[in-house]
Image: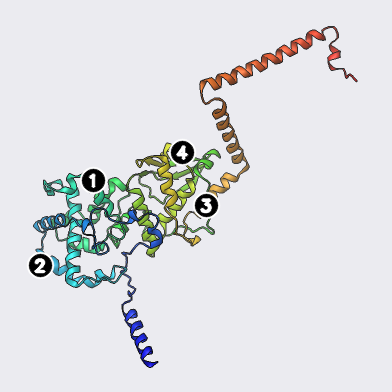
Amino acid sequence: MSQIVEEVAVTIERKMHNLTTGSIECCIYRVPEKLRRANAEAYTPQVISIGPFHREKTAIQLMATKLRYLKGFLHRSKADLPACIRIISELEDRIRQCYQENLTQASKELVEMILVDAVFVVELFIRSRYLEHRDEDDEIFNKQWISNAVFHDLLLLENQVPFFVLEILYNLTALSNTVTFFKLSYEYFKDVLHGHELASTSFQMKHLVDYVRALQLPSFPRGGRYKHGKKFELTRSAKELHEAGAEFKPGKENSSLPDVHFEAETLWMRHVVVHEWTEAWFRNMIAYEQCHLVQKYITSYAILMDSLIDTPEDIDILVSCGILENRLGSKEDVASLFNSLYKETMRDSSEFLYSDLCQKLNEYSRHPWNQWKAARYRWKVILYREYFSNPWSAFSVVAAAVLLVLTLLQTACSLMDVYAGDPGRLFRWHK
């Protein structure tokens, strides 16, 4: 019995020793399985692995390209290769704490991987802004499909290196004297994600996913809070609100994604382009918000959009008024995208940032006058669809109406002829 106790104790102690220790640096996570099941491809790199989580997939390394980028970086860096290795080696413990899992790589392997991958990202951003630093045979910028795939891969939560590593390496170049890494990163992402540039470089970004998310958030200092609603209340669809008389208008060009408000019968929302990267962007931002202790801005926005969009007709309304721009494909595809984003995520109603907004929209929809406007709108649609959808139908309705009027006139004339001698007989009761 004592031997069993001792063996079990040793086994449990070994398991406890191997547990991941919590760290305030932890910010790069494995996507929870319940989220991954919805669309695994949205979380999986296509052509290039950054960091340790997808290192075993040799088909997506682009190692030759990474090494060419490292060579170009060292050519313009103030530090040589040994100095760069020394910098990463000194940061090793802090780097390990950034990952959710205990990394199994030995120090030599990890330092090499982080250096090569981080330099690749820095050099990619440099070449994206400065054409003169590109090689003639650069396959990323010479092949659009690879460039698009790399852009997609840099938006993935599992495909990250710590932001401080990127900044430290970039600051070794002379370019850092004129352009900050914040600015360089913004230049790479801005044309596709349409975020606002961060006003300050004092923010402590965790990684590129955190940075890209911050580009979409309100411009007030991080840590500011929206007023939380008291209950988890969703709103009517865009079509129902439109029928009740509500208008939809795009917000100001510099407005943030979560900046949605309703006033004077108008719902103001920022213009959003829906394209091939949209689903991966939303899913990875939501996954980050679910794993990290941050406010659920993007998750709340996804829930609001799912509430506004029930059918492709809702997409038609949001596109026609300039809220959405569809570069993805069919309106059914766009509706399906927004209807599937937030499944298996938020359960705490206090985290939903639009409860007050939804309550205001629902009160507007339930107002008797607006209900009457919605009913009138639906009647007009039915009348048009059934009787005026084509010229022949309209002609038939008009002809039938004219025929009815003529019939009534003929009947009236006949009655007048019959009772011409004694008009009072027309109204006299006969038993």
Q: Position of residue 227 (x, y in %)?
A: 48, 58
- Residue 317 numbered tag: 4
Q: Which three-letter amino acid code belongs to the residue tagged 4?
A: Ile
Marks 2 and 4, how far apart at CA: 59 Å
**Who comes first in sequence, dot 1 or dot 2?**
2
In this view of the protein, can residue 1 be seen by the observer?
A: yes
For residue 109, side relative to residue 46 (left or right): left
Marks 4 and 3, how far apart at CA: 19 Å
- Provide the residue designation for mark 2: 82
Neighbours of disc 3 within 10 Å: few (<14), some (14-19), many (20+): many
For residue 363, side relative to residue 315 (left or right): right
Marker count (numbered):
4
Q: Which three-letter amino acid code belongs to the residue tagged 1?
A: Trp
In this view of the protein, can residue 294 be seen by the observer?
A: no
**Mark 1 touching mark 2, by CB under 8 A?**
no
Neighbours of disc 2 within 10 Å: few (<14), some (14-19), many (20+): few
